[in-house]
Image (cartoon, helix red, strand yellow):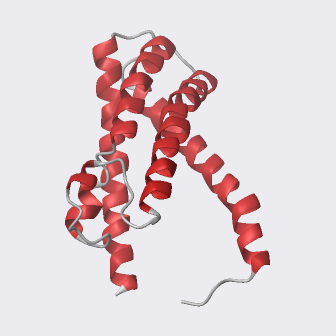
């Protein structure tokens, strides 16, 4: 692989990554709103967006902080994960097992548990129902990411 020009790296880092993150957060909040509407007519997009953003601090700040520590201590970015895949270091990053296990990230699971409190508050529903919505969204997101990972693997080989 060739090293991309510095202008491409700057464009990707400063413009495309934040825009992609924003679109992902907005789309995720919209899907959570739709899922929440099956349980309650309470709540609005702004509330769901806010709760989703706050819950994401767990994964984006704490999770990425731990991942950065792991990267710096291993001096490698490859196979640096806080998911169940960390317990299987012999797995290749492109293997089906790694792709599936990487969806069980400890910080993501924690984040979706905390998000359950926000969903319960926004939709004025029981916490148990909110957890079903939150972890149901996690399962949906994980299935989509596994499919994308398996399809992407075909292009890498």
Q: Nearer the viewer, residue 10 or 87?
A: 87
Residue 131: x percent and y percent? 32, 23
Residue 95: quadrant of the picture: bottom left
Residue 23: x percent and y percent? 62, 50
The quadrant of the rendering that contains the C terminus is bottom left
**Residue drawn at (29%, 26%) of the image:** 132
Looking at the picture, does residue 41 appear above or below residue 1? above
Residue 108: quadrant of the picture: top left
The quadrant of the rendering that contains the N terminus is bottom right
**Residue drawn at (75%, 60%) of the image:** 15
Report how many numbered discs are placed on residues in the image.
0
Seen as rendered, the residue at the extreme right is 7
Looking at the picture, does residue 102 appear above or below residue 92? above
71 relative position to 23: left or right: left
Looking at the picture, does residue 155 appear above or below residue 103? below
**Residue drawn at (51%, 15%) of the image:** 122
**Residue drawn at (31%, 73%) of the image:** 94
Residue 135: x percent and y percent? 31, 33
53 relative position to 33: left or right: right
Q: Does residue 41 appear in this view?
A: no
Q: Does residue 59 appear in this view?
A: yes
């Amino acid at each position: 692989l060739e090293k991309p020009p510095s202008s491409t790296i700057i464009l990707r880092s400063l413009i495309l990554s934040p825009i992609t993150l924003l679109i992902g957060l907005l789309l995720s909040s919209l899907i959570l709103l739709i899922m929440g509407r099956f349980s309650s007519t309470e709540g609005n997009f702004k509330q769901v967006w806010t709760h989703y953003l706050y819950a994401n601090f767990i994964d984006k700040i704490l999770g990425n902080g731990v991942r950065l520590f792991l990267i710096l201590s291993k001096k490698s970015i490859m196979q640096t994960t806080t998911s169940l895949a960390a317990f299987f270091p012999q797995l290749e990053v492109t293997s089906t097992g790694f792709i599936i296990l990487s969806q069980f990230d400890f910080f993501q699971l924690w984040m979706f548990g905390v998000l359950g409190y926000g969903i319960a508050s926004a939709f004025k529903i029981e916490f148990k129902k909110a957890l079903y919505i939150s972890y149901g969204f996690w399962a949906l997101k994980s299935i989509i990411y596994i499919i994308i990972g398996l399809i992407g693997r075909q292009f890498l080989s």
